Amino acid sequence: MDAPDTARQLLEQADSLAATAHRDTRWYARWLVLFGLLSLLTCALFAAFPGAPAVVLGMSVYGVGVAALVVWASRRGAATRYMTRLHLAVMAGFAVIWTATMVLGTRSDDPAVVFLTGGGLILLLTVAGAWVVTRRGGRRP
Amino acid sequence: MTAAHPRHQLDEVVHAPVRFSIMAYLAGVERAEFALVRDAVEVSDSQLSKQAATLETAGYLQITKGHVGKRPRTWFALTPAGREAFETHLTTLRRIAGGR
């Protein structure tokens, strides 16, 4: 095989398949954004309904939402490159922000501000993760 | 015609059309499920199994079998050697194509 045209066709084919692979892994970017929105919604519930109702309502919404996201993720057929590393990094960041929000929010004089700030930070973190997924996937293998 | 021509550096394991397509798809992912690769590459189940086994024997592909719920699933992932072989193959193709 030494024809430049054949080589070019193969390279175009590789590009096309890489684009298909990218399309098949973009679900994870949507997953991250949905997880961030769910976290923000839960924090907003904590801000709106202080005390025991917030815990019951917020954690119910959160539990159902996370369960739905886990089921959805388990049915996806492709994982984006470095997904394990990226997911661990985002979840570690989430754990830190979530813990700090809960600790500070339950002890603050103005818990609504703390909960909404924490939820907003989690959403920012997940949007950043989604940006990495879409950007990285667009690169040539 | 000399041995210095880039075509001599093409990896025959990678160069076969279906195997090339499998590797091109998998190069863009961490891992992918059997059905997704089959649909992307447009081959039959048996053809994909056969070519995947060849890539696995060459050390270019890791095949993992498992279950999601009660459904059996097969996952494919390029090994580091597979990624390197495919990247080298693309570099050689670029040279043949004229320095793309």
Image (spheres, rainbow, N blue to C red):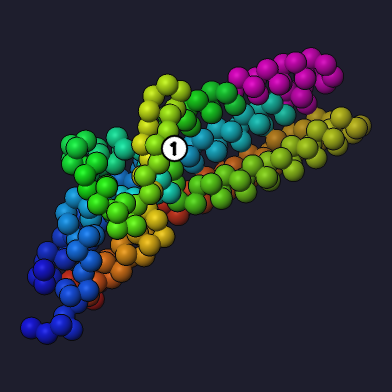
The magenta segment: A44-65
Q: Is residue B27 visible in the rendered structure shown here?
A: no
**Closest to the observer, A16 or B67:** B67
Q: Quadrant of the C terminus of chain A?
A: bottom left
* Prevailing secondary structure of the magenta residues: helix
Q: Would residue A122 be seen by someone viewing this image from the given angle?
A: yes
Residue A58 located within the stretch drawn in magenta: yes
The residue at the point 39 percent across, 24 percent down is: B71
Q: Position of residue A36 (x, y in %)?
A: 61, 35
Please identify the quarter of the rendering in which residue A11 is found.
bottom left
Nearest to the observer: residue A76 or residue A102: A76
Q: Is residue A119 magenta?
A: no
Residue situated in front as seen by the camera: A62 or B6: B6
Q: Quadrant of residue A101?
A: top right
For the point 72% across and 29% down, the residue is: A43
For numbered disc 1, what is the local secondary structure? helix
The residue that appears at 43% across and 29% down in the rendered structure is B67
Query: Which amino acid does the dot numbered 1 rest on?
Result: Trp
Residue A118: x and y in percent read: 74, 38
Give the x, y percent position of residue B90: 27, 66
Q: Is residue A104 above or below residue A18?
A: above
- Which residue is depicted at the point 87% across and 30% down? A106
Instruction: Tell me the residue that label 1 is attached to.
Output: A27
When asked about the image quadrant of residue B74, the answer is: top left
* Horizontal relation, residue A95 to residue A74: left or right: right
- Left or right: where does residue B54 sit relative to residue A114? left
